[in-house]
Image: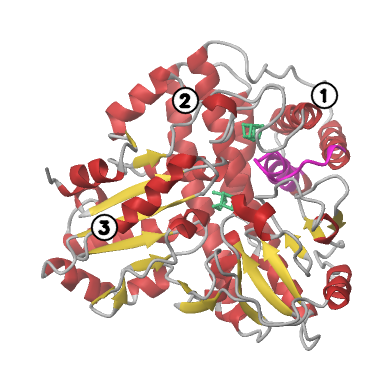
Amino acid sequence: MFCFQCQQTAGGKCCVSTGVCGKQPETAHLQDELVRELIGLAEAATAAGQRTPTADRLLADGLFTTLTNVNFDNRAIAEFTARVRAERDSFGGAPCKVVELWKGDTDTVSLRSTLLFGMKGMAAYAHHAMNLGYVDDEVSAWFYKGLCAVNRPHSVEEWLALIVEFGQMNFRCMELLDRANTGTFGTPQPTKVPTDIKKGPFIVVSGHDLADLAQLLEQTEGRGINIYTHSEMLPAHGYPGLKKYPQLVGNFGTAWQSQQREFENIPAPILFTTNCLMPQRPSYRDRVYTTSVVGYEGLRHIEADACGRKDFSPLIEQALALGGYEHDHSMSGINGGHMLMTGFAHGAVLSHAEEIISLIKSGKVRHIFLVGGCDGAHPGRNYYTEFVKQTPMDTLVLTLACGKYRFNDLDLGEIGGLPRILDMGQCNDAYSAIKVALALADAFGCTVNDLPLTLVLSWYEQKAVCILLTLLALGVKNIYLGPTLPAFLSENVVKMLVETYDLHPTTAPEQDMDAILGRG
Ligand code: FSO
Ligand code: SF4
């Protein structure tokens, strides 16, 4: 196997014998095979000069299936690949020759991988939007264009142009998903979320898919079962269309990489709607369910019917049978006893735009940091906790994605009635951060790069890659990126990113803070 798509890749280089994530060589091989078939499908459709809704969906779902910590089920991957092959055959023509993805000149492999991994991230966002009935023709068409581009030779300049074009398309896709989420469930409102678990039956829902959560909430109405979000599902509490359900009572645990410890002996079922799924320990393996593109051999999978309806009764029955905790349960040691705040997406933040602008003008807010992205097990990730602890009292911290669990239990106080930490939502809500930055730039008559704003990002998997490419494509400079740089970026590509975009690898919290605030 050869896989270097995520931050925890073996030795910071590549996984070759087994994945650090638990991916086995056979699964890696099947995922590569699926990507090759997806390229074949995009090529066949392009040669035939036509697309089909089935192919649109297969391209997005297929790429998402190969994203880190999504699908470990060899049979499910092979079956999906067979569907892709059948769709390709329906376009006629001979199967095309597909490039060796991981072979060739180092810079070419690096640029090709950057585009491919970015597309895997965008596929996840397109998938969630489609689940809510939102489709953007340009976004769907770009999967064909991008997969064909991955298959062809390009000069370095051409690769870079493709990557920038992709970054802009991913902005459009994040906007689509924002419209899908807010159009379906309303504008997120600031909401306090308890982290302790009430006695009695409950279900934990992980991942990013709000449509799945909504169906589960409908089906658990009046059943005496409480629902807890986990990891990236936390921002669901801010949406009026979801928070209206009285059984959506809190958040369980912290970020994805702590799941094996936090789920140990849990007396409740857990639903994984997307990544990040880890290999399970025996004490809770019989309680984990997957749905959609997520899969793991031996776990029960909830399929959608032709209309997209899912029957969650196996989880509901198991929740009732397990019965939950006998007494209210404090999650002490894992954020226990705290209330977490979420719901500060662009709608809520921009409703305070005037105050924020006057706080900046009067010098009460000296700087705004966006500290966010994905979390992981890498020891260097304490950087983000330390960095946020060191932010001066006259600064605001915007955050998003599961990296926020590194510091969202800190009490950093308030400025002018606003909490100093504002949780904007899931990783895709980077769209909100960009909207807020653009609105502030507009109000101050400057560019985003001239604002007293610095992005300090943590990356783990390929959604973070697409977000980074979007930020660069929008011309955002001076981003701090850690805990390590992607292994798939070659020395020359890193050099180019540093020179063109002032991209900074993170160093030490004090050192970066001094550089950002012009101290020392
Ligand atoms: Fe985290 Fe996993 Fe949202 Fe990622 S749960 S790591 S960027 O999937 O998608 O932030
Ligand atoms: Fe390794 Fe990450 Fe690939 Fe898993 S997804 S095999 S950890 S590089």
Mark positioned earlier in the residue sequence (1 or 3):
1
- Image coordinates for residue 517, horizontal then vertical, percent: 17, 49
284 vs 65: above or below = below
Q: Which residue is mark 1?
A: 93
The residue type indicated by label 2 comes to: Leu
Q: Residues within 10 Å of mark 1 (few under 14, many from 20)?
A: few
Is residue 62 rendered to the left or right of residue 400?
A: right
Residue plotted at (24% across, 71% down): 356
204 vs 159: above or below = below
The residue type indicated by label 3 comes to: Thr
Q: Are marks 1 and 3 in contact (CB under 8 Å)?
A: no
3D distance between C-alphas at marks 1 and 3:
59 Å
Q: Are marks 1 and 2 in contact (CB under 8 Å)?
A: no
Q: Residue furthest top?
A: 105
Q: Which residue is mark 2?
A: 489
* Residue 69 lies in the magenta stretch: yes
Q: Residues within 10 Å of mark 2 (few under 14, many from 20)?
A: some
Residue 154 visible at all: no
Mark positioned earlier in the residue sequence (3 or 2):
3
Residue 357 visible at all: yes
Magenta region? 55-74
Observer-nearest residue: 98 or 489? Answer: 489
3D distance between C-alphas at marks 3 and 2:
30 Å
Residue plotted at (38% across, 46% down): 383
Is residue 312 rendered to the left or right of residue 275?
A: right
Mark positioned earlier in the residue sequence (1 or 2):
1
6 vs 343: above or below = above
Mark 1 lies within 8 Å of ligand 2 (Cβ measured): no
- Image coordinates for residue 410, horizontal then vertical, percent: 39, 66
Q: Which residue is mark 3?
A: 391
